[in-house]
Image (cartoon, rainbow, N blue to C red):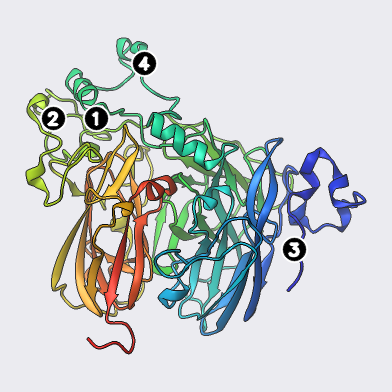
């Protein structure tokens, strides 16, 4: 394989001497990062034998340098370009002084190749090499990342594109892979320690007394008192904010302005991957409508939108068709609107477009507390408790930890049980209800091809996403993974319906390894296939699953610090190949 030059080496120490003679003309374009308007060519690896080396490196963004965990010296890691039907061997060398791993996110592989230490394999020890080998059974846009510790936050992630064996149903003239992520100069263990000390430590958009006096908090007196009683903050939609994060696009900060080129009139395919540790993004391109043609590597019927919310670990394929000889700003705004990643699509390097200002912070409301349809404030509706549109409620009489509503133990790690969770697959996401243009919802997604398994589910499995936001405790059905809860068990090829109920006031992107599930969204026979789905606060979603992959699989929230804190379970599918039923 080609030796990959350290992408950001020329910025290390603020001098070119770190890479030798300072001959930047000899470096590939992607190695010259940090240059405004640069259109780097992402390093790409393909073939049946690929070598990856995980190591320590310096990473510079915004004029500051920090410590990163990289693959082949670059951040993001190299683009892996494979083809459906091939076999691949990936030789992963661990040059770290700690265990590491790679999970092939969304790929259908034997469970021993899935890359989750303690569940599917023992991990990759320091100064050793592990070879992953598996057939490529699918096509689409995916990614890969560490499943060890908090290495994902440090840069251990990269894009993965699989070209179809036959004709691609999506016609396009040019493509760009766009990797969204978040970077912090804090060590990840510092981040989680701060969150444990104070759940809203990084929230710099909290409401103030002056907001209340001037009526800027947009809340009724009853709702304000209820949030106070529950010790919940209606501005707390993201645990880690711009106060700690720089939001990256293909490893570039907003000032570096990564640029993707096009010719006016082209159909441009954007393969958008959210590889952020803790950030959900709102994506839009002012002046350009987007046509969604795929999600999580699966084709969907085209749907035209202006904006979409992308959860951690989700991928979306979109088509844009710029006809003018002008630049467009690609905006990836954090869910709490504290900051944004910014890039440019343009006919020529050096062109820029206006960068829109951050929009007003979103506020959580009654629906986010699991009180959908129960009156009171509902963000997006504008309704207030005690008005004609929202009848008054006795919030003081409500028990947000009513144990009778669930069949699991409600301990200190569970601060609320949603009293009336509702299906929110038709909601665009926190803060996007009244933006004045079309925002994608899960109900808009229709699988391009008919579903292969249309059996009626024979079993319903209800799973509660639980937590204590103030103490930063996260769990599933009230138990952390470290408490060794019973696995969620399925018979091989069983058809089951999972109902995920979010008993917290945060959005959770939930990922099931080894499988795709179908979102029950009113499109029987063509339900969209996903491997990751956002479950909105106080909401629920139903998923039809065919448990056709034998083995032990991880099921977890893809907010890295939530998973690390315990929001994870093992899903077991039996029997294994060759094992008696």
* C-alpha span from label 1 to label 4: 21 Å
Q: Which mark is residue 4?
A: 3
Residue 169 vertical placement versus 148 (above, below): below
Q: Residues within 10 Å of mark 4 (few under 14, many from 20)?
A: few
Q: Nearer the viewer, mark 1 or mark 4?
A: 4
Q: Residues within 10 Å of mark 1 (few under 14, many from 20)?
A: few
Placement of the N terminus among the 4 image quadrants: bottom right
| Disc 4: which residue | 208
Mark 2 vs 1, N-terminal side? 1
Q: Nearer the viewer, mark 1 or mark 3?
A: 3
* C-alpha span from label 1 to label 3: 53 Å
Q: Secondary structure at mark 2?
A: loop
Figure quadrant of residue 403: top left
* C-alpha span from label 2 to label 1: 9 Å
| Disc 2: which residue | 389
Q: Nearer the viewer, mark 3 or mark 2?
A: 3
* C-alpha span from label 3 to label 2: 61 Å
Q: Which mark is residue 382?
A: 1
**Left or right for 45, reference 21:** left
Q: Secondary structure at mark 4?
A: loop
Residue 497 x/y as whole percent: 19, 66
Q: Secondary structure at mark 3?
A: loop
């Amino acid at each position: 394989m080609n030796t990959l030059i350290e992408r950001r080496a020329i910025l290390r120490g603020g001098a070119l001497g770190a890479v030798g003679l300072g001959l930047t003309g000899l470096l590939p374009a992607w190695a010259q990062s940090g240059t405004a308007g640069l259109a780097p060519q992402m390093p790409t690896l393909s073939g049946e034998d690929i070598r990856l080396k995980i190591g320590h490196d310096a990473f510079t963004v915004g004029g500051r340098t920090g410590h990163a965990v990289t693959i082949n010296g670059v951040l993001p890691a190299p683009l892996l370009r494979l083809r459906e039907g091939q076999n691949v061997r990936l030789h992963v060398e661990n040059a770290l002084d700690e265990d590491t791993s790679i999970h092939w996110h969304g790929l259908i592989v034997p469970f021993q190749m899935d890359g989750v230490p303690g569940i599917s394999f023992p991990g990759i020890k320091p100064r050793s090499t592990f070879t992953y080998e598996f057939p490529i059974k699918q096509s689409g846009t995916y990614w890969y990342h560490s499943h060890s510790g908090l290495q994902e936050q440090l840069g251990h992630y990269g894009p993965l594109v699989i070209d179809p064996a036959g004709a691609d149903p999506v016609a396009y003239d040019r493509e760009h892979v766009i990797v969204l992520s978040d970077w912090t100069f804090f060590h990840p263990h510092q981040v989680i320690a701060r969150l444990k000390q104070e759940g809203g430590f990084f929230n710099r958009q909290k409401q103030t007394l002056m907001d209340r006096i001037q009526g800027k908090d947009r809340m009724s007196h009853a709702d304000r008192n209820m949030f106070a009683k529950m010790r919940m903050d209606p501005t707390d939609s993201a645990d880690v904010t711009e106060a700690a994060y720089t939001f990256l696009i293909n490893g570039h900060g907003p000032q570096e302005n990564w640029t993707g080129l096009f010719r006016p009139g082209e159909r441009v395919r954007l393969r958008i991957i959210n590889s952020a540790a803790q950030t959900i993004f709102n994506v839009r391109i002012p002046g350009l409508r987007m046509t969604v043609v795929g999600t999580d590597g699966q084709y969907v019927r085209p749907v035209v939108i202006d904006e979409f919310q992308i959860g951690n670990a989700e991928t979306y394929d979109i088509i844009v068709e710029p006809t003018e000889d002008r630049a467009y700003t690609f905006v990836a705004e954090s869910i709490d609107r504290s900051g944004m990643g910014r890039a440019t699509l343009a006919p020529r390097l050096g062109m820029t477009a206006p960068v829109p200002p951050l929009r007003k912070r979103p506020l959580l409301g009654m629906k986010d507390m699991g009180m959908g349809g129960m009156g009171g404030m509902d963000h997006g509706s504008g309704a207030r408790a005690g008005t004609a549109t929202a009848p008054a409620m006795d919030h003081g009489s409500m028990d947000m930890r009513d144990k009778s509503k669930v069949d699991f133990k409600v301990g200190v790690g569970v601060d609320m049980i949603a009293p009336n969770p509702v299906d929110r697959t038709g909601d665009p996401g926190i803060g996007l209800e009244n933006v004045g243009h079309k925002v994608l919802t899960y109900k808009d997604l229709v699988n391009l091809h008919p579903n292969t398994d249309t059996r009626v589910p024979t079993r319903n499995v209800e799973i509660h996403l639980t937590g204590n936001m103030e103490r930063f405790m996260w769990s599933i059905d009230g138990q952390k993974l470290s408490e060794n809860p019973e696995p969620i068990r399925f018979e091989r090829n069983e058809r089951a319906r999972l109902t995920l109920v979010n008993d917290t006031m945060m959005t959770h992107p939930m990922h099931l390894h080894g499988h795709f599930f179908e979102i029950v969204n009113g499109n029987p026979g063509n339900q969209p296939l996903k491997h990751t789905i956002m479950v909105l606060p106080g909401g629920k979603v139903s998923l039809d699953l065919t448990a056709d992959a034998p083995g032990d699989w991880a099921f977890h929230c893809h907010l890295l610090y939530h998973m690390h804190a315990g929001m994870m379970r093992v899903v077991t599918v039996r029997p294994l190949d060759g094992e008696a039923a």
